[in-house]
Image: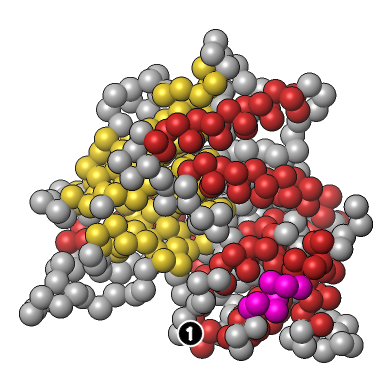
Amino acid sequence: MSITYIHLSDIHFGQEKGGEVVIHNDAKERLIEDVTVAMAALPQRRANGIIVTGDIAYAGKVEEYTAAGAWLDRVANAAGCDITSIQVVPGNHDIDLARISPATKLMLGTIIENGEAELDTYLANEQDRELLYARFAAYRPFAEGYNCSLDRSGGLASNRVVEVAPNRLLRFIGLNSALVCSGKDKAGSLLLGARQRVLPKEPGQELIVLCHHPLNWLRDSVDARKYVRSRARVFISGHEHKPAVHVDQIEEGQDLMMLAAGATIPPTADEIYTYTYNIIEFEWDERSDSLRVAIHPRAWNDNKKEFREDVGSLGGDHRRFLLGCPHFRSLSTRQPGGAPSSLKETGTASAAEQIGDRPVAEAVEPVPVEYPLLLLRFFRDLTSSERLAILVKLGALPTDWAEPLTHSIERRALDTLSRKGRIREVEECIARTIENRPK
């Protein structure tokens, strides 16, 4: 069984000026057409999901994410996957530079100067955390809708688990490499911090790490690279707009793929930087208990003004890889007696793993099948005032609510309504709210 993902990066919604709007919109339309054609050529004729490695927007504005969400819905429909099966991580263009106040600028400056200890000091304070994450004001509800919450404690930006074979899991982990971005970032100045850098390790589970910036952009890259090399199987990045792939043999039977994405929509398309995206297939190789990865790069053909197979990048015809997977091999396929091994439920990772500042108790309850779409519509498609009005109307928040409404509070309130079986009521409120907006 293979699983397939559309891989986008550096889409930069909102970057266009003048005639660039027409040119970029046409490229986005042709990409949707190309996805439809490419999926028809695959054995399963559909993708399992979409991954986006940062710079979804250009200036971190609400209207940019509104446009991005509508377009991603269409890409998902063309790919044959649910519009909720999209995993995102932030890039430097996903921060709103206008939200960097003098206090924020001072905070970022001291973090960049003094390193991780200073970052931990600010993350330990509620007011400082909100100030730090205010730069992601428009990105946060967009990402929350896809269940890719920004952990305000400095933890992972997304976390999903899928089954590639019985008892063989791929865990897609997203990192927020834009955590201390300020608009004037230099290679080697950014920080992940220990809460992101220390990657998990579990038998039967191989890590696919999504990160906007390549590792050399990180101040803590030496330690981060050690965790990636010892625990990850694939590291996917964006930012530099230069497609590349190579596989390192860490030791016998252990490989690491480093995949760098081109820009889906670069500022200007030319012979060096053009419109690109990837189709990535993952499949378990039973004989060697390894992971097969096939990359199908797609790039803009300027003569035809459409996407075609990119025969010039990522090693030409050599785009199929067999990666040694020690974490697969550390767990036998079946327990004695033929019973399947006991592993975490596949699909989306638990709530506690997804959102670091929510109670662990929320992780143990099953998620209704309608919930992912509800989550998307609630956070991505509504304004903060509309969300507040719905939560108050349904009694999830008191009518005299006067405190700052954080995403964590909103999410807990929505989760409570879901657990009480009130999903239909929330859906109806969302529909009425959108319908009653001023024309």
Query: Splitting the image into 4 quarters, where does residue 43 fall?
Result: top left
Work out whether residue 127 can be spotted.
no
Residue 187, magenta (yes or no) = no
Residue 427, magenta (yes or no) = yes
* Residue 413: % across, % down: 69, 82
Above or below, 27 relative to 418? above
Who's the residue at 63% across and 78% down the image? 423
Who's the residue at 38% across and 20% down the image? 311
Three-letter amino acid code at disc 1? Glu
* Residue 93: % across, % down: 69, 44
Q: Nearer the viewer, residue 364 or 94?
A: 364
Who's the residue at 53% across and 84% down the image? 362
Query: Splitting the image into 4 quarters, where does residue 296 fall?
Result: top left
Return the residue found at the far top.
Answer: 303
Q: Which residue is mark 1?
A: 365
Return the residue found at the far right.
Answer: 438
Work out whether residue 2 can be spotted.
yes
Q: Most prominent secondary structure in the magenta stretch?
A: helix
Coloration of the structure image: secondary structure
Number of on-image labels: 1
Q: Nearer the viewer, residue 361 or 388?
A: 388
Please give left or right for residue 180 compared with residue 398 in the image.
left
Please give left or right for residue 328 compared with residue 4 in the image.
left
Q: Nearer the viewer, residue 153 or 374?
A: 374
* Residue 39: % across, % down: 41, 38
Q: Residues within 10 Å of mark 1 (few under 14, many from 20)?
A: few
Return the residue found at the far left.
Answer: 337
Q: Which residues are magenta?
A: 423-429
* Residue 302: % across, % down: 56, 14
Above or below, 239 relative to 429? above
Mark 1 residue element: loop
